[in-house]
Amino acid sequence: MAVAVSGGGDSLALLHLLHDHGLAAAALTVDHGLRPEAADEARMVARICGELGLRHAVLQWRWDGEGNLSEAAREGRYSALADWCRDAGIGACALGHTRDDNIESFFMGLSRGAGLDGLCGMRPAFDRDGVRFHRPLLDASRESLRDVLHDRGVGWAEDPTNADTTYDRARIRAALATLDLPDGQIAQSIGNLAATRRDIGEELLHILTGHWRTDGPDIVIDLGAWTALTAEFRRRTLAAALRFHTAARHAPRAAAMMRIVARDWTGDPGPATLAGCTIGADGETIRIGREAAAVPPAVSTRETWDNRWTVEGTHSPDTVIRALGEAGVALLDPGWKSGTLPRRAMLAAPSVWRGDVLVHCPFGPLADPRAQEAWTCTSADDSQRFTAALRSA
Ligand SMILES: Nc1ncnc2c1ncn2[C@@H]1O[C@H](COP(=O)(O)OP(=O)(O)OP(=O)(O)O)[C@@H](O)[C@H]1O
C-alpha cells in the first residue's frame, strides 16, 4: 500500500512500521502550499524514503479559496492521494491517525454538542475514489510511536499549528496534557460508542427490511413504515438515501434534515428538496430521488480520429452499458450487456475496444485485489448500495 506521510511523527512511524512488514510500496507527501516549511518537510521525507529504498512522491494541492480552508485541504489531500494511487495501480493507502487523534476529536465533539456519530471515533478504513484508506494506528498512542522513532534515531517535523491554541484541536490537546486522564479508558468508551452505532445501523436495516425498494433511480419507502420510525431513525434513513444519491461525504445540517423528518407526509404536503434531492409522498410511499438538474451525465462520448467512439464513464460499468443502450449504440454483443463481462474486461485494461466503441475505464487497470473489491462495491446494484448506506447510517 501507499503511505501518506506528512513528515510528522505519527506518519513517519507508520512508514517505518509498514516498511518493517514489507507493506509499504510508496510514500506520498501532499504540499498544500500553505506553510513555507512544507517543502523542507517533503524533502526530509524524500531523504528518509531514499534510506529505506522506497519510492516517494510530492503531490501539490492549492486552495481555490472556496469553503473552509482546513476542510478543503483535507478533502483535497484525500483526492490527491487517491488519484496518485489509482494512477499507480495501487489500491490502498495508509494514514497515521492515532488513538490520541481519536481522543482529541472526542472532546472536540463534546465541546460542540455532537451526537453519537460525532463521538464514536474515526473509521478504521473507508473507500474514496476507488482507493481503500486504512488507519492501522488507531489503537496506538502518539507517545509509543515517538518511541519507535527515538529507538531508530529518526527525527520528525513538528507542525507549528499543533501548538497554536487559536485552533480547537491544539487547545484541547494542551488541556488534555495537563489532566493526565486514562487514555485507554477513554478509547474504550469511544469503541463502545462505535459498537452502539454499528448496532443502530443493523437495527434500522432490520426494521426497514421489506418496506423499501428501488424504483428506477429513486428510493421508495412505505409511508407506514416511515411514519412508525422514531425521528432519529427517520433522520438516519433520510441521510442514507441522500448519501445514496449524491455520494456526499457529509449529511446536510441537522436542522435542514429535521424539517423533512418532522413533516407530516401522510397528507399532501408537496415535495421538498434537500442536497440536490427531491422528497415527495403519494399517500402510500415516500420517494427520495435526485433532482434532475443535479444529475451528472452517466457517460460522455467523443468521436476519435478513426471514426470510432470513446466512451468515458464516471459511473459503474452497468450504468455506462445501460446509458449506451439508451443512446442507441447497438454495437455491444450480448456478453457485453450482461454486466459481468464488462467489469472483468475493464479490470483487465484501462481502455478496451468493443466493435466501434472504446470504453475507457476511469480507474485504470486494477491489479490489486482490494482495488477490485472497491470497484465491485461501487458498481454493486442499487439495492445493495442502499442497504450499505442504511447499515452505516
Ligand atoms: N501533508 C500531508 N501529506 C501526506 N499525508 C498527510 C499530510 N497531512 C496529513 N497526512 C496524513 O493524514 C494523517 C493524519 O493527519 P494529521 O493532520 O492528523 O497528522 P499530522 O499532524 O500532519 O502529523 P503526523 O504525520 O504526525 O500524523 C497523517 O498521519 C498522514 O498519514
Image (spheres, rainbow, N blue to C red):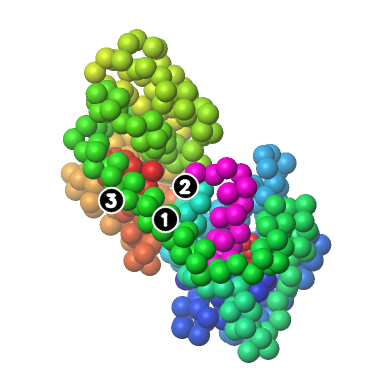
Under mark 2, the amino acid is: Asp
Q: Quadrant of ligand 1?
A: bottom right
Let me know if residue 287 is in the magenta part.
no
Disc 1: which residue: 194
Quarter assignment of residue 304: top left
Q: Residues within 10 Å of mark 2 (few under 14, many from 20)?
A: some
Find numbered disc 3 in the image and state the secondary structure of the residue it sits on.
helix
Which residue is located at x 56 percent, y 73 percent? 141
- Seen from the viewer's position, the closer of residues 86 and 265 is 265
Toward the viewer: 354 or 93? Answer: 93
Residue 383, position in %: x, y?
26, 40
Name the kind of residue labelled 1 in the image: Ala
Give the CA distance from mark 3 to mark 2. 38 Å
Q: CA distance from mark 3 to mark 1?
A: 38 Å
Residue drawn at x 77%, y 56% is: 165
Dot 3 or dot 2: first in sequence order is: 2
For residue 9, the mark is: none
Mark 2 element type: helix
* Above or below for 368 versus 227: below
| Residue in front for this viewpoint, 227 or 359 | 227
Which labelled disc corresponds to residue 342?
3
Magenta residues span 96-116
256 left or right of 169? Answer: left
Q: Earlier in the sequence, mark 1 or mark 2?
A: 2
